[in-house]
Every structure is written in structure tokens, then in C-alpha cells.
């Protein structure tokens, strides 16, 4: 398909979102249509972090480079947390689940956003994780630490599971982030009996292919939705910022566990997205996080769907 038709397709989806204008803006969903179904973007709430915690080991001019690229002037790194739901046939497939109530006070709004859009969380059939960081997996639990979606099937990459399920995970966390490992393991304990594992290249569900995008975490995966209207990649945290990770993929992102591997993954992914004209849906790109990547004289640029 051509880039032009991709843009039209995304514009139509923006119109679809207008049906929900009576909702508070933070709970509004955006949607795009496929030949075979609909892909929605819900917000789990804004993620606001002091820059000292984000750029904890990047100082001086190096830090200024990031702050300038991200236009941060007040010491706060503000990012969206978009959670995608694919409705196709009888299935409702959620990609990641947000953070629930125990990570940051501004997050954990996914259940309210689903409810506001008329989606009964109990009807979600499948949950596919990109990785096991708190803002992507902690939200599987309710106030009583039981599964919010007890009847769903769950999927994660084998490498991601093996890393966070290991007793060693906590010892390799950056100081102050030990809770990431403890929190992932406690969620895994709830999922152990109903989770399936995949690796890059596997077709997890009909038309949904796993893409190995490790680097951000040891088993990070993105999910490529194949559709006759054009493919879309659920990128997770393989690409997190329109300027920092897309225009400067070689810059090290302090959130990446293996910074060299993550940079290589970004370059490989951006090349594929631009060359194959694959639509992009990503967790931390500005809400609703739908867009695509264009390559212009070896510089990649992010084009938001609503721009
Ligand atoms: Zn994230």
C-alpha cells in the first residue's frame, strides 16, 4: 500500500474517535480500522518522571542533549502510556496492561478507560506482553492482587519470562529499581498456569507475528499485525520518543537494559518500518501513539497519524 493511503486510513480512524467526544479527554480512545477488525489506543494515564530518575547516569552536556531533543524545560519527563486493544473476529486482544495502582499515582487508568469506551474487561480473550516492566505488566492485578482478567490467555516471549523469572533478575537491576524485578516475579506467579511462550517469528495468534526487539529488556518483543489493509507494528518500548529514539536511534536510552543492543534493534526496526511502510503503534509516543516512519536521506522521522 502507498504512504498516501496509509495516511488516509489513519485520518479515518481519527474521525472514528470523535464518536467518544463526551468522555473526559484522558479516557478517550482512538481507533483505526483494519480489513479484519479495529485497533484501539487507550490511555493508562500520564507518566511523569523527574529527569534525575530518567537520566540517572547521564550528566552535563550529554543530558542537555536529551532535554533539548525532548523539549524538557521544567525538569519533568512527560510521556503517554498507550495501551492497544485489537478487536478481530471473536477475539479481543490486549497488548500490555498498564501499571495498575502500585507503580505511579498518575497511572492505572486502563480499566476506567476501557469501561468508559464500553469494553467489558471480562471479555478480553488474550493478553500479549511486549515486556515485563511495571508500566506494561503490573496492571494485570486488581485491588485484591487477583487477576483482573482471569479467563484470558496470556503470551510473553520465552526470553523475557526466563529473565524475570530468574532469582538473579533483582541483582542486575539499577539501584532503586529492584521493585521492577520483584513486581514482575510476583505477577508471573499469578500467570504461571495460563501463560504461553513465543519467540521472534512465531505466529502467536492468527495474523499476529512476534518480532524480536530485545535490548530494552532481554526478551522484549513487538507484535506485527498482518492485515490486508496494511501491516501495523505494536512496538512496545522498542521506540519510545519521536526525536530521541527515531531521529537519533544511536543515542543510548538510559531506560534500556542493554543500550548497545537496543540501539541496533531501533535501527533495524526503523529501516523495516520505513521500507515496508508498516504502521506504528507505540506505548510512549504522544497519544494515541499511532503513526508511521519515513526515511529521508538516511534520517528517520516519525509522522503522527493525526498530524
Ligand atoms: Zn514502558
Image: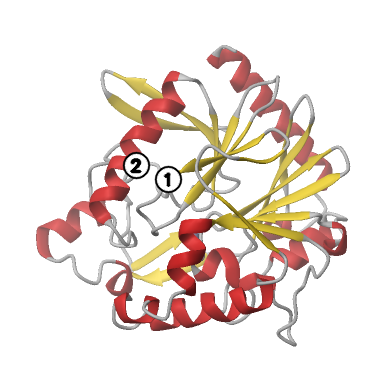
**Which of 177/43 is in front?**
177
> What residue is shown at x 87% (from left), y 58% (from top)?
123
Q: Is 251 left or right of 39, judged from the image as shown?
A: left
Image coords of residue 228 (percent x, y): 70, 19
Q: Which residue is mark 2?
A: 265
State the separation of the CA atoms marked 2 and 1: 6 Å
Q: Position of residue 137 (x, y in %)?
A: 59, 67
Tags 2 and 1 touching, CB below 8 Å? yes
- Between discs 2 and 1, the one toward the N terminus: 1
Residue 242 circle label: none
Residue 172 rendering spot, x and y as whole percentages: 30, 75
Image quadrant in which you'd find residue 194: bottom right
Left or right of 130 on screen, residue 216: left
Q: Position of residue 132 (x, y in %)?
A: 51, 65
- Residue at the disc numbered 1: 213
Q: Is residue 83 visible?
A: yes
Mark 2 falls on what kind of element?
helix
Please name the residue shown 77% across and 67% down the image.
Answer: 112
Amino acid at each position: 500500500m502507498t504512504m498516501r493511503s496509509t495516511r488516509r486510513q489513519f485520518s479515518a480512524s481519527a474521525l472514528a474517535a470523535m464518536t467518544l467526544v463526551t468522555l473526559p479527554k484522558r479516557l478517550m480512545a482512538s481507533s483505526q480500522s483494519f480489513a479484519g477488525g479495529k485497533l484501539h489506543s487507550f490511555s493508562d494515564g500520564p507518566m511523569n518522571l523527574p529527569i534525575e530518575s530518567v537520566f540517572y547516569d547521564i550528566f552535563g552536556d550529554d543530558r542537555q542533549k536529551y532535554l533539548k531533543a525532548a523539549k524538557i524545560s521544567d525538569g519533568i519527563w512527560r510521556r503517554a502510556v498507550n495501551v492497544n486493544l485489537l478487536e478481530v473476529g471473536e477475539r479481543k486482544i490486549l497488548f500490555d496492561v498498564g501499571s495498575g495502582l502500585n507503580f505511579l499515582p498518575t497511572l492505572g487508568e486502563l480499566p476506567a478507560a476501557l469501561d468508559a469506551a464500553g469494553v467489558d474487561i471480562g471479555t478480553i480473550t488474550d493478553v500479549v506482553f511486549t515486556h515485563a516492566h511495571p508500566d506494561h505488566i503490573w496492571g494485570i492485578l486488581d485491588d485484591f492482587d487477583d487477576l483482573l482478567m482471569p479467563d484470558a490467555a496470556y503470551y510473553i516471549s520465552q526470553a523475557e519470562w526466563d529473565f524475570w523469572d530468574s532469582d538473579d533478575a533483582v541483582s542486575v537491576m539499577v539501584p532503586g529499581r529492584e521493585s521492577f524485578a520483584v513486581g514482575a516475579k510476583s505477577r508471573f506467579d499469578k500467570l504461571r498456569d495460563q501463560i504461553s511462550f513465543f519467540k521472534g517469528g512465531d505466529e502467536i495468534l492468527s495474523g499476529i507475528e512476534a518480532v524480536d526487539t530485545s535490548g530494552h529488556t532481554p526478551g522484549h518483543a513487538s507484535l506485527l499485525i498482518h492485515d490486508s489493509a496494511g501491516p501495523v507494528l505494536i512496538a512496545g518500548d522498542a521506540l519510545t520518543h519521536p526525536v530521541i529514539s527515531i531521529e537519533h536511534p544511536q543515542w543510548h536510552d538510559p531506560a534500556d537494559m542493554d543500550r548497545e543492543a537496543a540501539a541496533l534493534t531501533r535501527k533495524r526496526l526503523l529501516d523495516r518500518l520505513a521500507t515496508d511502510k508498516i504502521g506504528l503503534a507505540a506505548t510512549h509516543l504522544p497519544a494515541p501513539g499511532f503513526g508511521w516512519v519515513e526515511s529521508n536521506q538516511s534520517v528517520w522521522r516519525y509522522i503522527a497519524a493525526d498530524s
